[in-house]
Amino acid sequence: MATGTQSIREIIAQQSSAAAILQRFELDLCGLAEMPLEQACAEMQLSVDQVLERLSDGEASERGDGTPDPLQMSTARLIQHIVRVHHSKVRREIPGLAAMAQKLAEKRGDQASELKKVSELVATLRDELLAHIEKEEQILFPYVMRLEEQIDFGGAAEHVCFRSVAQPIAMMMREHDQANIIFIELRQLTDNFALPDWACTTHKALFAGLQAFEQDLCRHVYLEDEILFPRAIALEAKPEYRRER
């Protein structure tokens, strides 16, 4: 667990989510890297207790404290878990990672030209994932939740713009694949996020953050592609299912 006496560099080194959290407080990860967190917070007129609380929440999220078995969750509970844990992480982390990538490209792009491409890819990832989760939350997930309710309690599912839930699911899975392709390209560009000897704190934080984000995204995609989506298709195939005409 992070403490106020640790330097920003030490905190980032021990907790993969720390860089994005600290950046949301507008702390300069490079310029303040060697400064104890409590001193950096004092200089920025921030509450060190509030920052430490956010870091603690991030650490707990990384450990997955108290996460139940997704196979035992109802469909509605699984969707709520995906939104609360994984969609929230996308909204929380990817804008900061894109900002770090852009800053690093501007600062070090002449020294390492691949960083410019890294910045472009992370910006694309940000734009695509934010649009992706919005479509899931506004269209697909509500339909699947109402589909489960209709099966359990009767009535007809409401009219929607697709003939079968398999259609938006196929689109979401293609978008999952596109995110994976971006990470494959990022790993090729960076030699699996290997750091050069001259890497600054922002560089280290970006690569650590991208690796942690990729791990969470893999779990996120697994829950949808392997559990939620097949369950939704199976629900729609039940004889109790009736769609409004």
Image (spheres, rainbow, N blue to C red):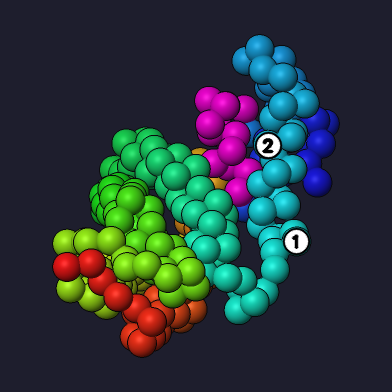
- Identified by mark 2, the residue type is Arg
Q: Residue at x 53, y 31 (%)?
A: 24
* CA distance separating discs 1 and 2: 18 Å
Left or right of residue 34, residue 191 in this image: left
Circle 1 — which element? loop
- Please report the bounds of the magenta region as a residue range: 17-32
Give x and y (percent) for residue 165.
28, 73
Residue beneath label 2, please? Answer: 54
The residue sitting at 70% across, 64% down in the picture is 67
Q: State the count of labels.
A: 2
Q: Secondary structure at mark 2?
A: helix
166 vs 97: above or below: below
Say if residue 112 shows up in the picture.
no
Residue 51 in percent (x, y) is at 69, 30
Identify the residue position indicated by label 1 in the image.
66
Disc assigned to residue 45: none
Looking at the image, residue 234 sits to the left or right of residue 42; the answer is: left
Compared to residue 37, the image places residue 95 above or below, namely: below
Question: Horizontal and vertical percent for residue 4?
Answer: 80, 30
> Three-letter amino acid code at disc 1?
Gly
Name the residue nearer the viewer: 239 or 186: 239
Q: Quadrant of the C terminus?
A: bottom left
Instruction: Locate residue 163, reporting x and y percent.
Output: 18, 73
Residue 139 within the magenta-colored segment of the rendering: no
Most foreground residue, 162 or 20: 162
The residue shown at (71%, 15%) is 42
Q: Earlier in the sequence, mark 1 or mark 2?
A: 2
